[in-house]
Structure formats: structure tokens, C-alpha cells
Image (cartoon, rainbow, N blue to C red):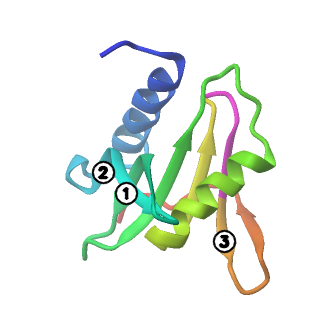
Amino acid sequence: MVLTPEEWVRQNYVEYLLIEKKYPISLIAVEKQVVVNKLKKRFDILIFNKQGAHNVIIECKSPKIKISQDTFDQIARYNLQLNANYLIVTNGLEHFYCTLDIKNQKYNFIKEIPDYK
């Protein structure tokens, strides 16, 4: 596997989840397929809760990529299928944490996701 800038961000974010946030590696999936509007897509990182439900979806971009509305729209589309509690977008330099208010069609930004309990 080639260590692309996006892959570097993904690997470092997984390390952050394991070391700082204390999420067990057994609850973290990396680069798995999801079908969105009959199209096959791949999410970067997905964290499950203890019951096996989708809890956090994370979209990683290269540090050279500026986080934009398109990035949030991409993760929101994935979340229509996954129905995770938290959405994270990161380029390794900037990190945005939010929940998605589907009823009002808006993002609710939060400081960070909770530590694993």
C-alpha cells in the first residue's frame, strides 16, 4: 500500500482514536464499502458502539485539501445509509466534529466526540 497524504491522515487519526480517545481497535473499521443511491462508495473510518451500531463516521482528506461544504455533503450522504451519531471531517490539520440534524437539514458542530466509555 502506498502511503498517500490521505492515508497518512487516516492512519494518524486511527492512532489518535486508539491512544487518546481509548476506542478499542475491534470497534474500528477502515475503508469499507457502503452503497449510497445505488453507487458503491468507501468510507474512511467507522466506529461502532458496543452493541455493533454505527457510532462515528470519519472522512479523511489530504492536508492539502481545504475542508469545504462538499466534504460535509459527502459524509452526510454516507450517513444517510450508516445513520451514525457523530460525523468527523479531518485533513490532519483541521478537525470538524458534528451531529447531523436531518429534520432541520443542518449540522450541529460540537467540540469533539466523547472518549470511549
Q: Is residue 84 visible?
A: no
> Amino acid type of disc 1?
Ile
- Dot 2 crowding, Cα within 10 Å, few <14, some 14–19, many 20+: some
Q: Which residue is mark 1?
A: 47
- Magenta stretch: residue 95 in it? yes
User: CA separation, marks 1 and 2?
Assistant: 5 Å
Whether residue 69 appears in magenta in the rendering, the answer is no
Q: Which residue is mark 3?
A: 100
Where residue 28 is drawn, which disc sits there?
A: 2
* Quarter placement of the C terminus: bottom left
How many residues crowd around disc 3 within 10 Å: few (fewer than 14), some, or many (20 or more)?
many
Q: How far across and how far down the image is residue 12, in percent?
A: 44, 28
Q: Which percent across, then down, holds residue 84?
A: 48, 69
Residue 12, which numbered label?
Answer: none
Residue drawn at point x = 39 percent, y = 37 percent: 14
Q: Which residues are magenta?
A: 92-97
* Residue 11 to residue 3: above or below: below
Residue 51: quadrant of the picture:
bottom left
Q: Residue furthest front?
A: 38
Q: Is residue 29 visible?
A: yes
Asked if the residue under mark 2 is in contact with the one under mark 1, i.e. CB atoms within 8 Å, the reply is yes
Q: Nearer the viewer, residue 28 or 104?
A: 104
Which of the two labelled residues, at mark 2 and mark 3, occupies the earlier sequence position? Answer: 2
The image quadrant of residue 94 is top right
